[in-house]
Image: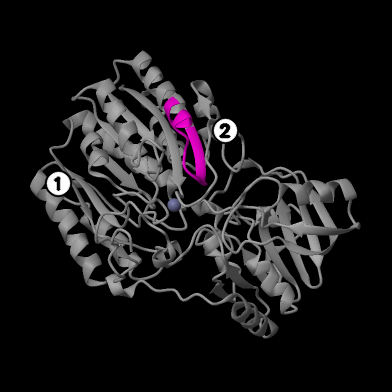
Amino acid sequence: MARIAVGGMQHETNTFMPTLTDYAYFCTHRDRPPLVRGADVTEWLDGGSFGLSGFLAEMADRHDLVPMVWAGGGAGGMVTDDAFERIAGELIAALSQAMPVDAVYLDQHGAMVTAGYQDADGELLRRVRACVGPDVPIVASLDYHANISPEMVAHADALIAYRTYPHVDRRETGARAAAAIELMLERGRPAGRAFRSLGFVVPSHQQPTGMEPTKSFVDACIDGEAGDVFNLSYLGGFRLSDIHHCGVSVVASAWTQVAADAAVDAVAEKILRREAEFDEPMLMPDDCAREAMSIAAKSSKPVLICDPQDNPGGGGSGDTTGMLAALVRNGAEDAVVGTMHDADAAVAAHAAGIGAELTLDIGGKADLPDNEPFHGQFTVLALGDGRMRTTGPVVGGRDIDIGATALLGIGGVKVLVTEKRVQAYDQSLFRHVGVEPKDQKILGLKSAVHFRGDFGPLAEKVLVIKAPGGCPADPRDLPYKNLKLGTRLGPKGPPFLPNR
Ligand SMILES: [Zn+2]
């Protein structure tokens, strides 16, 4: 029986958002647990849909696990140095107390940026390595959207990424991290680790792992885990972190350096050969609304419109109004838009009660270009307290608290407003206010890809709308400053040059 310290600090940082992610945000129970420590880590994460949940399922009966700190900040603007130092400091203090340990497992995202650290995940791993010394294996599980740095590779023995987007294999990834640690407990730290940056960034909506070319890259990683190679991970990267090490990459761990290098080179060659194949067209808002209405008129199944540029899962504000306005303006019927983050509107609807008529300015409150509130007269159709258990394949089984919710109607369009920001990734959000998703004509969802997990099977067709928001899909629309010189802005896109 080994003694293994476990914990994690996760954030996907959209450095283009004006809002900051502070310590209080990490501590709030939202669509994921609040910051937890010690025994509360297992209390909240056991049986859940996180990497650490899968790790616990594999290892809790076999080893002496020492829970440290787990903090899931979701996605949003820059993490404050205060939040990073407090959480990282607490984690290192807990690790110091737990010493000596035989291994460390961290459940990270891999795209955390603070004012002080472009590569905050690398800094966290550096501190963990400094604490445990050169002999103790460190394994981290990462989101598929991690941006990998040489520092992360240097300090961790394996960086094991989700293989699915929508992310339906978080638990399995934790189990793969557990298997890697079991190997290292037998054989020691591996001699080989390799990393290749592919030199370009990709919009999220072009990255689902069920679509080509990504599917082949992930399959190649699965096939490549053989012989001396025990981890081979493809990472789509997170283009909304404006940092030096941003973009698509491949990482491997193996018992020899030769095997690790050969494994990443084989996948990297395949990616570069197929770089031009990333594709998923976007429609301008009015065209998208009319196309959805036209398809919906002939179908018994809903048409899904995804709004990737206002994806809360990419750090978006979840309150932009382009999709709602286009549907109302074009006279859509039986259409539901969600989730619209607007605490004021949700609270006002609760105060007014079901059946009330309210004149409201919905959304449009985040300080973003072209983001205006939607002004109109709404009927309060349903209310909820925002506490529910999720049911879908992406985040299922979570007890979430998204604050006051309200379903508001205007013409043939309904909008689900929420007090706390949440991505439209689970049908439970809609059922909570009495909307059965499969019975709608049009569902407008604030999500880039995760909606495909739970809503995809219902759909007649998925359309991608190009409405303004905090997650511009086209990298050429982003005011980058810190990318590595020459990074291609999109697959086969123009190179990043400073002061362009
Ligand atoms: Zn992700």
Magenta span includes 81 = yes
Q: Amino acid at mark 2?
A: Pro
Residue at x 55%, y 73% (from the top left corner): 462
The answer to which of marks 1 and 2 sits earlier in the sequence is 2
Measure the alpha-carbon separation of dots 1 and 2: 39 Å
Position of residue 349 measured from the top left corner of the image (x, y, whole percent): 83, 51
**Element under label 1?**
loop
Quarter of the rendering containing residue 340? bottom right
The label number, if any, that marks residue 122 in the structure image: none
Boundaries of the magenta span: 71-85
Q: Which residue is mark 2?
A: 34
Name, please, the residue furthest toward the left. Answer: 258
Q: Amino acid at mark 1?
A: Asp
Position of residue 175 measured from the top left corner of the image (x, y, whole percent): 37, 41
Would you call the spot at circle 1 few (<14 residues within 10 Å), some (14-19), or many (20 or more)? some
In the rendered view, does 460 fall on the left or right side of 125? Answer: right
Residue at x 36%, y 24% (from the top left corner): 5
